Image (cartoon, grey):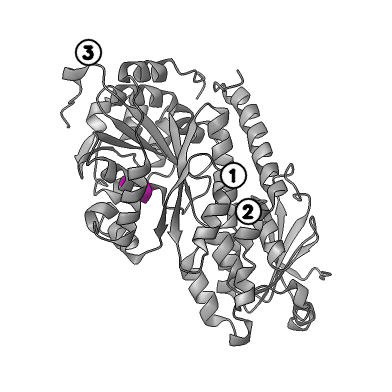
Amino acid sequence: MNLPQGELLRRRVLEDVGTVLRTAFERELTGYARLESQDTLLLDADGVGVLTFEDGIPVAAYHTGSDAAGTEAVTDIGSTGPYRLELYELDEEITEQIHDDESLQIPPALPARQLSGETELVDQIRERAPETWQETTSDTSLDAVEQFLDDEQKVEAIRDHARSEAQSRADEWQFPTDQT
Amino acid sequence: MQVFKYDTRANVNYMVEVFAVASGKGGTGKTTSTLALGMALATEYDVTVIDTDTGMANMLFHTGLSDSETTLHEVLAGQAAVEDAIYERFGMDVIPCGTSLAGFREADPRRLREVVATVAEGTDVILLDSAATLGTRSAVLPIVLADRVVIVLQPTVPSISDGLKVQEYAKTYGTDVAGILFNRVTEDENIDTVARKAQRYFDGETLSKVPESETVRAARRASKPLLAHAAESEAAGAYREAAGKLTVRDADSTAVADRFRNAVIPDES
């Protein structure tokens, strides 16, 4: 996915992707969110997740670390927070070109449903999204949560990283551990 | 002021188990879950729930205790005795936490072990409502102090990812996993498949799958725990199912109290 930079609207560090989705929705953003993981030790974390929007509705996703597109990219974005967020506005002609690439497309409510769990936002996005963008059966069967859980390597990387982080913090915080 | 009911039992050994109710991420419904599990367990056990999320406390809003003068903040600040912060509500002993920034600043997390030790001498089950972060020592402390942790998950990628982190922190600090509890489950999710796949990575069983429900929000608005507000709701039933799977392990309460008192917690705050 090649994107021109566009106009920077917002830059901040955040833990919850739901905040990005809510902001884009409320601003009716046409443009994209660039989500750079702050957890540099995680698998794929050196990459950047990109979610694009049209009038605040998520349309496409890509992750530069794993080279994943579409739903798979949503999975990668979900498992690598916290993030440094940059929100950019783009001209509609530019986003339309990107959104024509079917491999990048995602069901509009998928990120809200599987990354934020905010049911109200899910309903709002579904309500506002054009009918032709709505989820199909094949979209939901390719579930981002299930994809994440099927990726044993990614899950183990998260667990390994958490274990070593807990151990080093135990030293820092002087907590007793099973290893000490 | 509450009457401290434990002093007459101080020399007797009672059984007690301490659970931390935790998730690495906010919005999963930890406080709702803590109180629901507490009320369900209270039909069989003497239960104490403690709001140990000292930075973003909200148990007091769920239990009609928002006007309480004495809370865990005052106890952790050394300005009040534990017994002054215990309120008998909904068949449980509730220790709420205040919400002021000043209270949070003055609270010394090291005193939490003494609080748990004191309470442990006179109750069967202690539930610690934990902070939604693993980023600070005081947030992780309840997980360190607990015997087992109940991990509350939403069926979303970040929530499950953070739940895995909670599990690894718990195990690193010698705390077992009692099980996972899926909360705020909507009809969209293939929850049975997700739960089955998630189970492979978590210790302990899947305790329950609690549906997202307007009833839960209504209970919160009514300042009541779910099981007091809508005992017959589907969500309440799911929590009772979870509590039924939490077989409380026997432990000598004096030994537990001693363990908390002797827990190696750093001196600096």
- Residue B203 horizontal/vertical position (percent): 53, 39
- Residue B135 visible in the snapshot: no
Q: Name the residue under label 1.
A: B201
Pinpoint the chain carrying mark 1: B
Q: Mark 2 points at which residue?
A: A149
- Residue B257 horizontal/vertical position (percent): 35, 19
Q: Quadrant of the N terminus of chain B?
A: top left
Residue ID at (32%, 26%): B16
Q: Compute the Cα span from label 1 to label 2.
A: 9 Å
Which residues make up the magenta segment?
B31-35
- The kind of residue tagged 3 is Asn
- Residue A29 horizontal/vertical position (percent): 64, 75
Q: Name the residue under label 3.
A: B11
- The kind of residue tagged 2 is Leu
Nearer-N-terminus badge (1/3) = 3
Pinpoint the chain carrying mark 2: A
| Contact (Cβ within 8 Å) of mark 1 with mark 2 | yes
Residue ID at (74%, 41%): A41
Q: Helix, strand or loop at disc 2?
A: helix
Q: Helix, strand or loop at disc 1?
A: loop
Which mark's residue is nearer the viewer, 1 or 3? 1
Tell me the chief SS of the magenta region. helix
